[in-house]
Amino acid sequence: MGKNLQSGARLRPIDLAREGGLSTQAVRNYEEAGILPAAARTPHGYRTYTPLHAGALRAFLALVPGHGHRTATSIMRAVNEGGVDEAFRLIDESHAQLLDDRRTLQAVESALRGLGPDRGSAPVSAGGTAARSGEAAEPRAEAESGPGGTFIGPLAQRLGIRPATLRKWEGAGLVRPHRDPRTGYRVYDDADVRDARLAHQLRRGGYLLEQIAPLITQVRAAGGLAPLEEALRDWHGRLSARGRAMLTGAAELAAYLDARG
């Protein structure tokens, strides 16, 4: 079909579907979602599209890998409704998130470079299980630390997460706080804080708890960066792919904007 968006050719839904590797129903759904401009109709009610619609579809499909389906949809809807500035704002937000993710990766690498010997595979203390009904409440954030470490509230605050998240990570084996024998409160030593930081950064990088657990276990045993080198290379690759996809999406969107005039 080509990319001559100025052509006056009339296109059927199947024509757009074939170019995008989609079903005709998907094309209709995209029109209803505002991703494509509204189609003209024949006297018999059949949709007819133009190369402008094909350009919109190409732009959307090119935006998805870099920005995600939801943001790409919002970008195209804003453009088709005349809100180009809103579309640019959404694009800026995606680029800012990518930059933040790159900084997060750098923070993970920086943290890992400073790793020291760990507790290894030492057994979890008997008090290291999740809180049960009837146990003493965890300390509030203003209680900074107890003997040998940090309480759950201050650590959650430092990471910008909820204490419940730390408890969930404990259940998944990502952190192994011990219990203060007097109060029963969870206490996180330096190794626990490091593990929590790594878990937090890897979660932000898109890793699942079940993917993070073996990495942290390896770090505990090895006490160094080597166990995470493959994961970090993969993370670098995914960020680079997103950046490249954003460039491709920008080119297709620019072509579509030019065609709209």
Image (cartoon, rainbow, N blue to C red):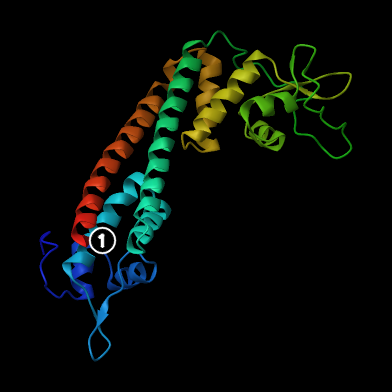
Vertical comparison of 217 with 248: above or below:
above
The number of discs equals: 1
Instruction: Give the answer, above or below, for where 183 lies relative to 172.
Output: above
Q: In the picture provided, is 251 more to the left or to the right than 234?
A: left
* Closest to the observer, 104 or 252: 252
Q: Residue at x 19, y 76 (%)?
A: 12
Is 116 rendered above or below residue 102?
above
- Residue, x 63% and y 15% (percent of image)? 191
* Crowd around label 1: few <14 · some 14–19 · many ≥20 (10 Å): many
- Quarter of the image for residue 43 reads bottom left
* Left or right: 158, with 224 as reference point: right
Quadrant occupied by the N terminus:
bottom left
**SS type, badge 1:** helix
Judge left or right: residue 50 versus residue 141. left
Q: Which residue is mark 1?
A: 56
Q: Which three-letter amino acid code belongs to the residue tagged 1?
A: Ala
Q: Nearer the viewer, residue 19 or 92?
A: 92
In the displayed image of the protein, which residue is found farthest to the bottom? Answer: 44
Residue ranking furthest to the top? 117
Q: Nearer the viewer, residue 203 or 249?
A: 249
Indicate the position of residue 253 as horizontal and vertical percent values: 25, 52
Above or below — where is 192 with respect to 135? above
Q: Quadrant of the C terminus?
A: bottom left
Locate residue 143, reporting x and y percent.
81, 21
Q: Which residue is painted at 52% across and 34% down in the image?
A: 203
Q: Position of residue 192 (x, y in %)?
A: 65, 19
Q: Position of residue 91 (x, y in %)?
A: 37, 45
